[in-house]
Image (cartoon, grey):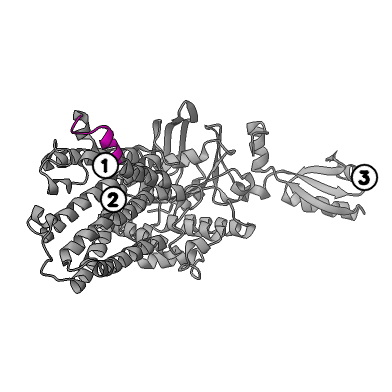
Amino acid sequence: MSNFFRLVHNENIKIHARTRTWIMLGILLLVAILMPVLFHFISDGIGVWSSMNTMLQFWFLPTVFSIAVAADSVAGEFSRGTIKLLLIRPWSRINILLSKYVSILLFILTLYALLMLVSLGMSALLFDTSSGPSDILGELAGSLADYFWWALLYRLVDTLMYVTMAFMFASLFRSNSLSVALTIVLIFMGSLVTLLANPSQYEIGRYLIFANLNLGQYLASDTGNYGVTTLGFSIAVLAVYYVVFLALTFWVFRKRDVA
Amino acid sequence: MESISDKIAQTNDDNVGQPIVRFKNVVKKIGRKTIIEGLTLDVPPGQVFGFLGPNGSGKTTTIRMMTGLMKLTAGDIAVGGHSIARNFEQAITQVGAIVENPEMYSYLSGYANLRQYARMRSDVSKERIDEVVRFMGLQHRIHDKVSTYSLGMRQRLGVAQAILHRPKLLILDEPTNGLDPQGIRELRDYLRELTRREGTTVFVSSHLLSEMELMCDSVAIIQAGKLIDVRQLNAESDAETLLETIFDVEQIEEAIALLEGGEIRDGRLVVRTNREGIAEINARLVQAGIAVYGIRPQKRSLEDQFLEMTGGGQIV
């Protein structure tokens, strides 16, 4: 049996051979270079880590890009008809889908690395590395740098959850546009849903995925946005959602008749 | 080991060698509709085996089940002794296939596409890819993007990915779709070449009877999800068999009197005779001063036989 990583390599090629992917990388590169320059002109005496904490606001860019790539990775094979020639190889469907998922995880990391490393480099050039005047963020996590690394990690968790959701929709519905649209709608609906089923009023609310996403809420308060959850609780809830999403994704992909 | 094609030539028997594909009472239902109804069939090795039937008779569904793309409702399909349902990886490793149109990654080059499929196996070297590219006559365009290929070239690339790993069984679903006469002829030639050189069994589906007749050693005929006949096609025995032959002559009555046989059909003389006989009759007619404008042996084509069997009308 040949190596599983050759499957991942195949998937990476399919992602990186597309012009689309290079446009996404180009946009991220531009944002990573220009934003610190903009901060430099509009704000006085901020430090590297203040700049980086502001850069985190752009977490939606790698997220949306990865959602598009994840949905296309599965649904695109169906709409192009290439799924047939892909599945008639001596590999189980589980392995084929897993290789796609691994390649998407690598893609998420690539996008975040590009955005954060380049903007960190730019910020280091433009701003005082010895941290600017400490503000409220810095006090929450010990230092502004600590705050940044934790917030970045939590944003990665959010991205992972949304991308896994898009991957699931693509396996369920085999439609690229539907999967992307549904995921984006859910991102926007999150705050609305938690407003209606407010976890501080309704017990059920705290088990909704939306109440537990954005783990960064625990940087500001140990009991989160609603005062009824903890970091451990949210991680547990997200883990359950994550496992259910992936189980559904693989189960449907494995048993589906391919026409 | 004795070559498979030799064996077939010697015995001309259906059941020589282990069948490469065994369908055992295969049933496929989609919703309440039965697409395939109890298909039992053995495909002998080393042949070009035709799977013939009108559109909508279940050919593509059968091929999807053979390649594991669709699950069987009941029964089993074994390829080289391995069940496609229970031992998918062992079964499929012996198979190369095109299911419907050969859709490839159009944003990659033909070569990059082949590399994709080569990476999914451990037994395809770079040399083998180059060999297949040359065999399919794609060497001049192989590094261009597939989006720039004509339909004929995509078909060839489709065959290339299917034979890359020297499969024992090559499955082609309506391979002549979209090919021009030249392309169809080439396809026929290289399928022959494959069975002869590598002992590959070719399982080819089509609704085009005349093409199957030229391409296949045997055909299975399927209609409305049921197997209705399996038969061997023998192109070589023509010399011996009696054929109806049409003679287009001026003086039909005289000709009949002269030959003491034959009949008139649509104003033409029809005689039952073999190859030798045709030449002899022609000579006698000409000697008797009867002008012969045309001679046409009436081969009873597969199409005629098929229409007879299915009661006509059903063929698209």
The answer to which quarter of the image holds residue A223 is top left
Marks 3, 2: nearer the viewer: 2
Outermost residue toward the top in this view: B32
Gap in angstroms between the C-alphas marked 3 and 1? 86 Å
Secondary structure under badge 3?
Answer: helix
Report the residue at 88% width, 55% height from top.
B286
Sort mark 3 into few (<14), some (14-19) or many (20+) by Cα contacts within 10 Å: some
**Dividing the image into 4 quarters, which one contains the C terminus of chain A?**
top left
Which residues are the magenta region?
A190-201
Secondary structure under badge 2?
Answer: helix
Mark 1 lies on residue: A246
The answer to whether the residue labelled 3 contacts the one labelled 1, judged by CB atoms less than 8 Å apart, is: no
B314 or A244, nearer to the observer = A244
The answer to whether the residue labelled 2 contacts the one labelled 1, judged by CB atoms less than 8 Å apart, is: yes
Q: Is residue A176 left or right of residue B190?
A: left
Whether residue B125 is visible, yes or no, is no
Give the percent coordinates (x, y) of residue A240: 20, 38
Give the percent coordinates (x, y) of residue A244: 24, 37
Q: Is residue A235 left or right of residue B220?
A: left
In the image, is residue A103 above or below residue B67? below
Q: Which amino acid does the dot numbered 3 rest on?
A: Glu
Choose the circle earlier in sequence order: 2 or 1. 2
Gap in angstroms between the C-alphas marked 3 and 2? 83 Å
Q: Which amino acid does the dot numbered 1 rest on?
A: Leu
Give the percent coordinates (x, y) of residue A85: 42, 51
Mark 3 lies on residue: B254
A64 or A125, nearer to the observer = A125
Report the residue at 21% width, 29% height from top.
A204
Give the percent coordinates (x, y) of residue B210: 64, 47
B99 or A143, nearer to the observer = A143
Secondary structure under badge 1?
Answer: helix
